[in-house]
Image: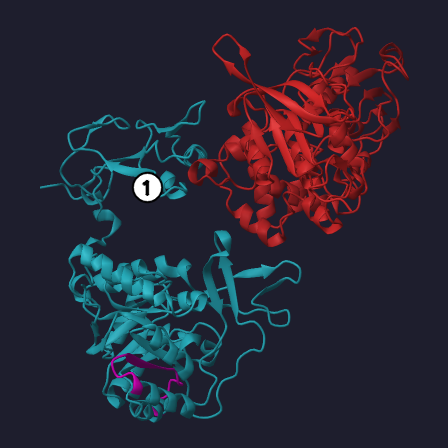
Amino acid sequence: MADVMTPGLAVGRLAAEELAANFEDLHPALTPHEAVVAADRCYFCHDAPCVTVCPTDIDIPLFIRQISTGTPEAAARTIFEQNILGGMCARVCPTEDLCEGACVRELAEGKPVEIGRLQRHATDTLMARQGHPFARAESTGKRVAVIGAGPAGLACAHRLGVLGHDVVLLEAKGKAGGLNEFGIAAYKATDDIAAREVEWLMGVGGIELHTGQILGESFQLEEVAGSFDAVFLGVGLGGVNALGVTGEDLDDVVDAVRFIAHLRQSKDMSELPIGRNVVVIGGGMTAIDAAVQSKLLGAQSVTVAYRRGRDQMGASRYEQDLAASRGVNLMFNVQPKEAHADEDEYLAEIELEYTADDGTGLKGTGETVRLPADQLFSAIGQTLTLDAGLELDGRKIAVGPTGRTSREGVWAGGDCTPGDDLTVVAVAEGRDAAMDIHRALMA
Amino acid sequence: MADLTTDFLGITSPNPFWLASAPPTDKEYNVRRAFEAGWGGVVWKTLGAEGPPVVNVNGPRYGAIYGADRRLLGLNNIELITDRPLETNLEEMARVKADYPDRALIASIMVPCEEQAWKDILPRVAETNADGIELNFGCPHGMSERGMGAAVGQVPEYIEMVTRWCKQYYDKPVIVKLTPNITDVRKPALAAKNGGADAVSLINTINSITSVNLDTMSPEPSIDGKGSHGGYCGPAVKPIAMSMVSEIARHEPTRGLPISGIGGITTWRDAAEFMALGAGNVQVCTAVMTYGFKIVQEMISGLSQWMDEKGHRNTADFIGMAVPNVTDWQYLNLNYVAKAKINQDACISCGRCYAACEDTSHQAIAMSEDRTFTVIDEECVACNLCVDVCPVQGCITMEAMEPGTIDPRTGKVVEKEYANWTTHPNNPGAVAAE
């Protein structure tokens, strides 16, 4: 049986109980008592800063007051009216950068109201009840194709469904949910929450899900644009950036997004191979999620190698500290130079070059360091792969404020459009596009 | 080091903190523990007449209301006087007093409004060597239905009559405990004084229903689906109690009548406030029922520290000090002008001051794009609501304007001279200033 010291890739480095404990809920549900105590701390601010920074504009003081007066179901409605994926957002939002970061009690005492966990308390309570809380309006007879069943597409489809439109939801993968299902660390989405949320959300009615439908392969944008009254694109970012170093093609150099997706879909963590020495290249949330989960699977040493300084890191300080607390090493100002193989052509070392910025851009200093590595994850960003003739803004689909693309009748939102690549941002964009589609169709 | 020893009616106790007549003082076990914890005195739970004791309900006796974090702010009860035999209580009182001669021990009594009933019980209480008695004319529930407690306290003539009997048949201090369930507390206080009372103690509890169970539609505390009003106490009643204490302290006919202050006293500061308003000592109940006897340690250390800081050598130095400052509205200085001031360094930008002022007051706080809140002196009437709703203590203060400066709200010069409503030109009954 393997353990943390076993060289190379190995499965079952940790005992089943330890694995289970490692992948427990990062922010477990509040007990009713904890929820009341946490809700008590909210000051019910005027024009509250937490709401201002929430991409979906959830009325946070109102929902917390509803929890504190014993009506978490009403609180959940307040949340879901703005954000139908409020359950997932309560788990995955970087609240430290958003609502909780803006909380006046963060300023007052360095301890914000636990908005994320309170939101989860409310949404869990309502979702545990029978039935769906929103009624679908009378059918409008309008048909909308929503391409991509990630957070943006789901939020768009749900809002359209509520408004009475008939939605056909086309998903490339075998399962809906997008990054909530395939791309978030497992300890943030326990108990199959992403899938349960999709099923619950579809309960509104009027949404027909088709999986395995790949835009550009199974069907073309032309076709759907021609046969539906409107189209929403929430296709995300299908490609990953290449490292561009020698040795990149070695077997154990893999894309972190794929590793995380595989892990999320795995029923048994003890069957997942993980290296003894893992190195993750990148500095965003994907890098942290890959690194932490590698450690939780039993890797002996895990290092995140980021080419810039700590302050530029995409992952929040909270996430950096989380990684550090799980035993992940964070290296700053290093970039990959070459992946070295052993005599059997297995990855053995990653050679990193130190970097510095003298004001003319980031450059390698020439000094290098080698880390033992039998598994290397690349997490240096994802790219849009869709080529449907739409106008671009940089490397993403150009959209107006309500998601209108350059093509009449086609809207877009989520990671495939500009803006922060966050679930909550995608939800806001999907929802707002749905409202604009509704206005356009009913005009 | 301040001396907390307090002389109340010639009864000395090591500190002014007594436990009020209530569940915590119902038996020897509790009272001994209270004295060990440091309490200066105890008013034993009310004794009834000889014979079969009263009975209590066998369901909930207490109901509560809460502030944030389930902090108990108000408690009500439907418990009656002691439900233990008179002889048991008397024996225990005698034993405790013998073992704690330096502590005050007062017997609370409630017997029917008949001379014989008082004549019977008083000598027996005297035998215990208790330091005095307190007449329970305040219990608002249960006993009042039987013509005792508040039913007596609401009729000044009865108060005077019973007090007189007690002074006749008992030779130690007689304290009359007053009910707040009346319109003017000065009347029963005066009646007590006229009957020869050595002191009054107040307030007893207030008629109350703490909540209604919305599933069963029963008031709480609920006994088999029904509720009865109880007696309300705890921090929520402190302002009512302090006003009543001050009324007696400054009313000419009752001025100088010793007062034992009761009503929501929870900390040393509450006690000092009651004493500043004229209470010679204080009695505590709800706070110990919430936190246990140990809180007296904080009360002792806090009062000592404050007295040292203020230079008070003993409690008599500050008792009644605030009484001259309690006045009628008509004598308040209308030439005093203040403005709210927000300390931007302390402000956490919650905007509660803004919401309160904008929605419910004088639209005197401005809010900027970046959530900076500032007072608009042209609109501010110094109502204090912003201070009251601000979650950060000391962040918003009321600053008096210097005489000679111009109040931007009225455009008038702030006058140095005191002037009140009695001479104000808008007052139809104003007396022209000489």
Q: Colour of chain A?
A: red
User: Going 50% across and 72% down the picture, which residue do you hit?
Assistant: B78
Q: Is residue A245 left or right of residue A333?
A: right
Q: Is residue B104 magenta?
A: yes
Give the camera-side residue of B82 and A186.
Answer: A186
Q: Dot 1 lies on which element?
A: loop
Q: Which chain is cyan?
A: B
Where is residue B404? Give x, y as percent.
15, 29
Residue A88 is at least partly visible in this image: yes
Where is residue A293? Give x, y as percent.
69, 37
Q: Where is mark 1, residue-wise?
A: B394
Q: Is residue B237 magenta?
A: no
Q: State the extent of the magenta-drawn residues as a range.
A: B99-116
Give the camera-side residue of B124 and B335.
Answer: B124
User: Going 50% across and 59% down the picture, which residue do you hit?
Assistant: B65
Quarter of the image for residue A270 reads top right
Residue A55 is at least partly visible in this image: no
User: Going 25% across and 63% down the picture, which residue do you hit?
Assistant: B275
